[in-house]
Amino acid sequence: MKLAEHLADLLCDRADHDESIFVLDGDLADSDGADRFAERHPERFLMAGIAEQNLIGVAAGLASTQWKPWAFSFAAFLVYRAYDQIRVSVAQSLQPVVLVGSHAGALAARNGKSHATLNDIALTATLPHVEVFAPADRADLEWLVPDLTLRPRAAYVRLPRADIDALAPLGGSAGPVRLLAAPAARTIVSTGLATHWAAALVRSLAARGTQIGLIHVAQLKPLPDLERMLEDVETIITLEDHVVLGGLGSLMQDRFPERHVRKFGWPVNFAGASGSDDDIRRAHALDLSSLTDALSSPDIERNFAC
């Protein structure tokens, strides 16, 4: 099951007991998971069609009358086509609309660059009064969905296209930040789908005798307290399914201006491409083999960001 479908199921369960939850969709319900809510709560579902600007306007209107609206669509359409409506009607107007952007990131398969969402964190994180999340597994959603329904506020939830497995935490439960491998001199901080890349990378490096820490950040704005986890870390390495400018890497560099932050992500001038996930990652040195070689190199201190 894809994360968007699991989110919709969790929202359905909450809606069984909270009649103020309302879902809207931009004509992609069978792909972004919202059809599951439509089946269980049809009286609180609106298919807004391929009209994302209007979808956000209606969602903001519902929020202003005490509904708890969740607006679903592909991230590329939800964020880019309706950005001004999100800016004015949601962020500036302090309306508690939750935006669920599925199929986020660069790996859009045959859909190609029109469906790639490479800088959505940068766009949404710079809006006032909008929180930003990039869950990596079902545990993240099981923490996040109740929190957003119990304390309604404007938020953007970024979800990948791919079906992904559960992460194995070192300790503790899901929340804004999770420790997945004990911090070391070099520690990866990752988010969303890229945390799965990072987990595979930690295992690959361990096989070569290199120990590296891993911290998963599910909440990007506001960025959680990471100071204690990174206290003894010499080099912070960020890994994300987003361009290296304006995403997690930039947020970490801003939080830790005096620290070594080495950023791995998509090049700023990459607009997306059609192809398999493996081929697209390999073309930009974000595949497991390339990342393993890069982090095994004594030249890790150079900035690999493009």
Image: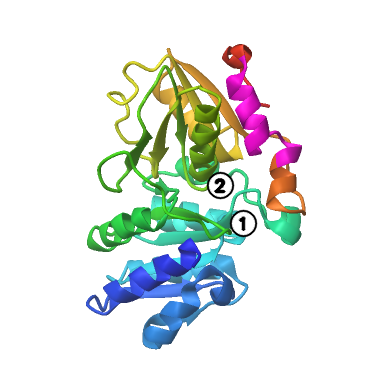
As for residue 118 lying within the magenta part, the answer is no
- According to the image, label 2 marks what residue? 120
What segment is highlighted magenta in the picture?
282-297
The tag earlier along the polypeptide, 1 or 2, is 1
Instruction: Please name the predominant secondary structure of the magenta segment in the image.
Output: helix
Is residue 277 or residue 288 the one in the foreground?
288
Residue shown at the point (59%, 43%) measured from the top left:
119
Residue 179, x across and y down, in percent: 34, 36
Check disc 2 and report its element: helix, strand or loop. Answer: helix
Q: Report whether residue 194 is seen.
A: yes
**Residue at the (27%, 61%) spot, across then down:** 146
Q: Is residue 136 left or right of residue 13?
A: right
Mark 1 crowd level (few <14, some 14–19, many ≥20, 10 Å Cα): many
Cβ–Cβ under 8 Å for marks 1 and 2: yes
Q: Which residue is mark 1?
A: 76
Residue 154 position by quadrant: bottom left
